[in-house]
Amino acid sequence: MSTTTTDTQNDNLRMYVNDTAAMAKHIEGAFDQQRQDDDVRSHPAVRALIEGMHLTLAAQRTAMERHAEELGGGVGAAVKEAVTTLTGALAGLYGKVRKHPLSRILRDNYTAISLACVAYEMLHTTALATGQKSLADTAVRHLKELTPLIMGVTKIIPEVVVQELAKDDPRIDTSVAKQALENTLNAWCSDSKE
């Protein structure tokens, strides 16, 4: 594969890199804010997961900004435009006043990380198609760093949900968290279209 790109290819690469950098910056900011939340701080497993999310996205943002500079442009205006577009999709990340906040924070984080995963998949594909091996490698490495975070949310959310439900109704059967997790993991591994 050639590493010489046309102007059109460079424009496409810049667009994907800038969008991805903007997304990482926006999500990182939300995770940073969540780290300060009293409910997050009071739940060690959730706190650790969100800390990991924040550190991962911070490092990814830095790498994407570096790639943007290498492609001949910063992410300044592009970040502003992309963040404006992302704001609607990720607005829930900043919500603080809500019922059952930890479960909803985790749900919103799952959504944000899923968005990041598909953005990196698109960037990886674009970089491969234009012969940009270094950028393609970065994108797939970032994708691989995010997938365990999605699994982290998957594994913790049933327990958080039943804990929050039990605060409102002590008669809730909290033992179902294990079954809910097993059912979710089975759904992801299922080949059938039942």
Image (cartoon, helix red, strand yellow):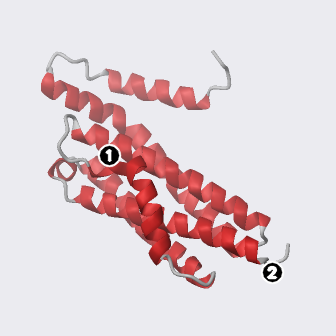
At horizontal 75% and vertical 77% (from top left) the residue drawn is: 7
What residue is shown at x 33% (from left), y 21% (from top)? 176
Question: Please, is residue 96 above or below residue 130 in the view?
Answer: above
Q: Earlier in the sequence, mark 1 or mark 2?
A: 2
Q: What is the x, y in percent for residue 11?
A: 67, 72
In percent of width and height, residue 40 lies at 22, 50
Where residue 135 sits, quadrant-wise, is: bottom right
The amino acid at mark 2 is Thr
Which residue type does callout 1 highlight?
A: Gly
For image coordinates 48% across by 28% down, the residue present is 184
Q: Is residue 155 above or below residue 109?
A: above
Q: Which residue is mark 2?
A: 4
Q: Secondary structure at mark 1?
A: helix
Depicted 46 relative to depicted 100: above or below: below
At 41% from the left and 66% from the top, the residue drawn is 25
Q: Which residue is mark 1?
A: 92
Q: Is residue 125 visible?
A: yes
